[in-house]
Amino acid sequence: MTSTPDREPTLQDLANGLKQLISDQQSTNERLRALTKDLEISNSRMDKWEKRFFQLSRDNLIIARTVIIAAASVVILGSVLDKAEVLILGLARLLGKA
């Protein structure tokens, strides 16, 4: 809606400008609705990936804990089994069998 300085805009010019503004607003609203829908879809995908990531993290923690416990058991039992002969003789003496 451009007007020249020589003439005032007519009622028809104003009506055409208003129709154009309404049309622009409607198309903008449609694009906004489409963007909102895309954003909701994207958020649901992110939620799924977030759940997968946290489940993987929990699984990794469980595996790490299991490996640490197994390694500690090997170290402790290894040192105990090195002395097993002495321990068995001592236990036998305690029980009065030796």
Image (tube, rainbow, N blue to C red):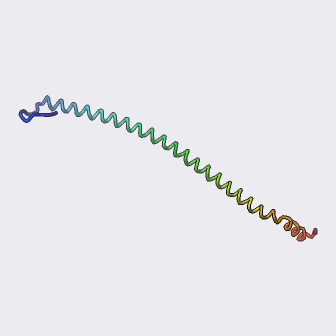
Residue 19 image offset from top left, x and y in percent: 21, 30
Q: Residue at x 67, y 57 (%)?
A: 68
Quarter of the image for residue 90 reads bottom right
Quarter of the image for residue 23 reads top left
Q: Residue at x 84, y 67 (%)?
A: 87
Residue 1 image offset from top left, x and y in percent: 16, 33
Reply above or below: 72 against 96.
above
Q: Residue at x 87, y 68 (%)?
A: 91
> In this view of the protein, which residue sits in the foreground, 52 or 15?
52
What quarter of the picture does the C terminus occupy? bottom right
Residue 95 image offset from top left, x and y in percent: 90, 69
> In this view of the protein, which residue sits in the foreground, 45 or 68?
68
Residue 69 image offset from top left, x and y in percent: 69, 57
Reply above or below: 58 against 40.
below
Left/right placement of residue 36 relative to residue 2 reads: right
Q: Residue at x 30, y 32 (%)?
A: 27
Q: Residue furthest front?
A: 82
